[in-house]
Amino acid sequence: MTDVNDRIKETIEGNDVVLYMKGTKTMPQCGFSSRVAGVLNYMGVEFKDVNVLADEEIRQGIKDFSDWPTVPQLYVKGEFVGGCDIVTEMTLSGELDQLFDQKGISYDKDAANKIREANAS
């Protein structure tokens, strides 16, 4: 198990933004992964995508690593942010923008505002 934990740790520490997901950022293979990847892509965030469907060890290992039962999982500067619901809420509340600002992650602020405008009731 250490091997998979080491691989996960290296990926998270070696990339500013990492999304463990089903599929890839250009071809997500589940709705939740698609939503999170879509938000990041739309906001112009550079991120490393890790397809858990391509590696059974990583698929289970990331759940154990984060103690979070589902995928997708977003990490920013080594910190676990959350899954689809949390990332969606953070996007709509502006908390994701704040996190990116605090961590020095570049993103398109106008795109982030457009997401909120489109989802305003």
Image: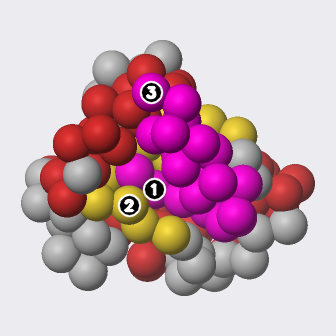
Q: Which residues are magenta?
A: 1-20
- Tell me if residue 73 is in the magenta stretch: no
In this view, the residue in front, 90 or 63, is 63
Going from N to C along the chain, the mark reached first, 3 or 1, is 3
According to the picture, the residue beneath numbered tag 3 turns out to be 1
Q: Is 10 a magenta residue?
A: yes
Depth check: give the residue in front, 5 or 20: 5
Q: Of circles 2 and 1, which is in front? A: 2
Amino acid residing under circle 2: Val
Is any part of residue 15 visible from this angle? Answer: yes
Q: Residues within 10 Å of mark 1 (few under 14, many from 20)?
A: many
Mark 1 = which residue?
19
Q: Nearer the viewer, residue 119 or 103?
A: 103
Circles 2 and 1 in contact, beta carbons < 8 Å:
yes
Q: Is residue 48 above or below residue 5?
A: below
Q: Nearer the viewer, residue 40 or 10?
A: 10
Location of mark 2 (residue): 50
At x 19% / y 58%, what residue is drawn? 54
Q: From the top left corner, tell me how far across and down residue 109 is, in percent.
A: 67, 75
**What is the three-letter code of the residue carrying label 1?**
Leu
